[in-house]
């Protein structure tokens, strides 16, 4: 273990900013493994710097979004140094800083991904109350712009949240965005939020929530030509939800007050019927469908299909094949059309319903999803 004086001496005195000093103290105290209090940080800095240390360590820690995080609900608060914080300190100091013991841990609680900046990501940002509650995080060398905020659960636990939008629609862009999210922020769960086309069976309405279980790449297979007829032989690799997540979502399939409360906040036209949650196969492919007969073709192989869209399979596949610790994953997309005579008129409402349902579901059910987190 490096001596604290060695970490301080790695940079010139003029480069020892408050951030450098606090991150150095956190690392030396082992906060990348076990959280520490502000008093422990202050004591270490006073010992080495006398009266020349940071003036308000608590306020500084609150400002270092992504670099540190609050751990648990204990009093006094305990702070943990994230992997991103260690990487920032490594970059500033030029030192080799060992973090091998943290490879099995998460750094972020929830990572949201949207395919579109508008109306999907903008609806998600508004679902947290205000744009001002979000801060940009991450490094400019990455393609995506990341925003961070906090979500407080029903039991008062603060959760770290990061969100971004893909650079374009489609499976490939979604898979790339998810992979970069996982590697940079190490989330416990990745949540896809947005809009989709619904199938007409099951009495679906605009704004109904579609939860992909499983997500299916319906274009995966073999095209054959037999007896003068071209045919398609599907060879999908469906990916379903974590069993615990599936069980919790099942509770919301019946008419419930949560969806009614969300609907009541929408200030424009809504559908006359109550909105519902539909859990089932959702098809994904890099194509916009404006032909109802194409949906019928897909349903020949997936009779319980609840909708189609263009990203979720890429998200599920990226999470499914991520390094340990793997994140859980789920997709909440709301119906904005029925793959025929497409119009954008219901997209804002669908994006609003999906974003608010995702946020409220996580706020209410988090301790049931991650009882030990």
Image (cartoon, grey):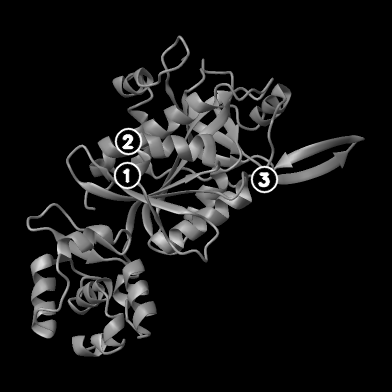
Looking at marks 3 and 2 on the same chain, the residue that comes earlier in the sequence is marked by 2
Does dot 2 land on a helix, a strand or a loop?
loop
Can residue 162 be seen here? The reply is: yes
Q: Residues within 10 Å of mark 2 (few under 14, many from 20)?
A: few
- The disc at residue 353 is none
Q: Is residue 3 left or right of residue 331?
A: left
Q: CA distance from mark 3 to mark 1?
A: 44 Å
Residue bearing mark 2: 129
Q: Residue 107, how many percent across, how many down?
A: 32, 61
Mark 3 surroundings within 10 Å by alpha-carbon count, few (fewer than 14), some (14 through 19), many (20 or more): few
Closest to the observer: 135 or 226?
Answer: 135
Q: Is the C-beta separation of discs 2 and 1 under 8 Å?
A: yes
On the image, numbered disc 3 is attached to which residue? 235
In the rendered image, the vertical position of residue 67 relative to residue 303, given as above or below: below
Toward the right, the furthest residue is 228
Provide the secondary structure element on which disc 1 rests.
Answer: helix
Q: Which residue is mark 1?
A: 133
- Indicate which disc, 3 or 1, sits on the residue closer to the N terminus: 1
> Residue sitting at 47 percent across and 46 percent down?
113
Nearest the eye: 2 or 139:
139
């Amino acid at each position: 273990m490096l001596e604290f004086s060695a970490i301080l001496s790695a940079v010139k005195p003029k480069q020892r900013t408050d951030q450098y000093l606090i991150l150095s103290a956190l690392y030396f105290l082992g906060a990348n493994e076990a959280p520490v209090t502000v008093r422990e940080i202050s004591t270490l800095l006073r010992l080495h710097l006398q009266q020349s240390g940071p003036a308000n360590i608590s306020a500084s820690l609150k400002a270092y979004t992504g670099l540190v995080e609050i751990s648990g609900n204990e009093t006094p608060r305990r702070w943990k140094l994230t992997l991103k914080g260690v990487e920032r300190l490594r970059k500033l100091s030029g030192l080799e800083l060992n973090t091998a013991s943290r490879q099995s841990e998460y750094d972020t609680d929830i990572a949201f991904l949207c395919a579109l900046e508008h109306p999907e990501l903008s609806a998600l940002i508004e679902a947290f109350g205000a744009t001002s509650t979000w801060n940009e995080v991450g490094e400019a060398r990455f393609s995506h712009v990341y925003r961070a905020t906090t979500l407080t659960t029903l039991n008062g636990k603060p959760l770290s949240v990061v969100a971004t939008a893909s650079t374009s629609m489609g499976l490939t862009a979604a898979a790339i965005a998810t992979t970069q999210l996982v590697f940079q922020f190490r989330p416990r769960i990745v949540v896809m939020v947005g809009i989709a086309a619904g199938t007409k069976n099951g009495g679906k309405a605009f704004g109904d929530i579609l939860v992909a279980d499983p997500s299916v790449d319906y274009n995966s297979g073999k095209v054959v030509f037999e007896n003068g007829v071209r045919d398609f032989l599907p060879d999908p690799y469906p990916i379903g939800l974590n069993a615990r997540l599936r069980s919790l979502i099942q509770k919301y399939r019946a008419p419930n007050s949560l969806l009614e409360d969300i609907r009541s906040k929408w200030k424009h036209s809504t559908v006359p019927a109550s909105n519902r949650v539909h859990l089932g196969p959702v098809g994904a492919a890099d194509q916009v469908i404006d032909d109802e007969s194409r949906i019928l073709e897909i349903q020949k192989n997936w009779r319980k299909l609840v909708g189609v869209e263009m990203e979720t399979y890429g998200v599920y596949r990226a999470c499914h094949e991520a390094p340990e610790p793997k994140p859980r994953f789920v997709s909440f997309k709301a119906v904005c059309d029925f793959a025929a005579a497409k119009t954008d008129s219901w997209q804002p409402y669908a994006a609003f319903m999906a974003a608010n349902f995702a946020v409220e579901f996580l706020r209410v059910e988090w301790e049931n999803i991650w009882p030990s987190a």
